[in-house]
Every structure is written in structure tokens, then in C-alpha cells.
Image: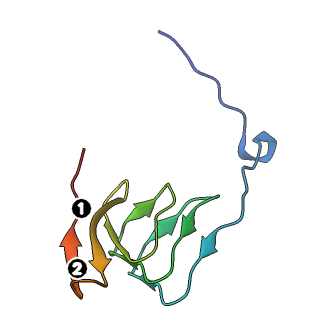
Amino acid sequence: MIQVLCPPPEYREYITAPVKIGKNVWIGEGVIVLPGVTIGDGCVIGAHSVVNKSFEPNTMIVGTPAKAIKRYSFENKRWEKVKQL
């Protein structure tokens, strides 16, 4: 049997970085935003999402890990689906 030793919490290194949240951002219940993430102005984050990377302004974000599903088009004045890779 392989045993992996993990140091007790008081000896673990803390990883910190500022989180930047833009103006007019809606964050649903239970959302977790990880260190170093920037959320652009006008974003909407669905409930219980885990945001582990930065997103552009006016983006609808959902999931674990969070991904962009829609972006607001000011030209068409509506939310439009984001093409997934």
C-alpha cells in the first residue's frame, strides 16, 4: 500500500491573490471565486459555480469549473450563445 503524507494545515503554504470584480456583476448563491480571478463588468454568474479563471465583461458564466455560455451583444441587444471549443 502506498501512503501519501500531507503536512498538517498549519504547515501548508497559503496561496493568495487579489480577486477583481467589475461593476454591475450578479453573483448567484454559493458561488466560489478562486484567487487571482478577474470578473469583467456586467457578468452574471450562476448559483454554485466555481470560477477558476478570468472572464471578459458581459459574460454569462455557469458550472464547475465555470465556463462562458453566453455574451451580451450590444449590437443586437440580446444574450448570444458562446461557441464552445
Q: How far across and down, in percent of the image, does residue 53 sit?
A: 50, 55
* Left or right: 78 in relation to 66: left
Determine the CA span between mark 2 and mark 1: 9 Å
C-beta proximity under 8 Å, tags 2 and 1: no
Which of the two residues, 79 or 46, is positioned nearer the viewer here? 79
Which of the two residues, 17 or 80, is positioned nearer the viewer here? 80
Where residue 13 is drawn, which disc sits there? Answer: none
**Residue ID at (43%, 72%):** 31
Q: How many numbered marks, from 0 up?
A: 2
- The residue at the far top in this view is 1
**Residue ID at (75%, 41%):** 12
Which three-letter amino acid code belongs to the residue tagged 2? Trp
Q: How far across and down, in percent of the image, does residue 28 sit?
A: 38, 81
**Residue ID at (71%, 65%):** 18
Q: How far across and down, in percent of the image, does residue 76 sit?
A: 21, 84
83 shown above or below 26: above
13 shown above or below 37: above
Which of the two residues, 24 or 76, is positioned nearer the viewer here? 76
Badge 2: how crowded within 10 Å, few (<14), some, or many (20+)? some
Q: Which image quadrant for residue 16? A: bottom right
Q: Secondary structure at mark 2?
A: strand
Which three-letter amino acid code belongs to the residue tagged 1? Val
Q: Which image quadrant for residue 27? A: bottom left
Where residue 79 is drawn, which disc sits there? Answer: 2
Q: Which residue is identified by label 1?
A: 82
Badge 1: how crowded within 10 Å, few (<14), some, or many (20+)? some
Q: Secondary structure at mark 1?
A: loop
- The residue at the far right in this view is 11
* Left or right: 83 in relation to 5: left
Q: Which image quadrant for residue 47? A: bottom left
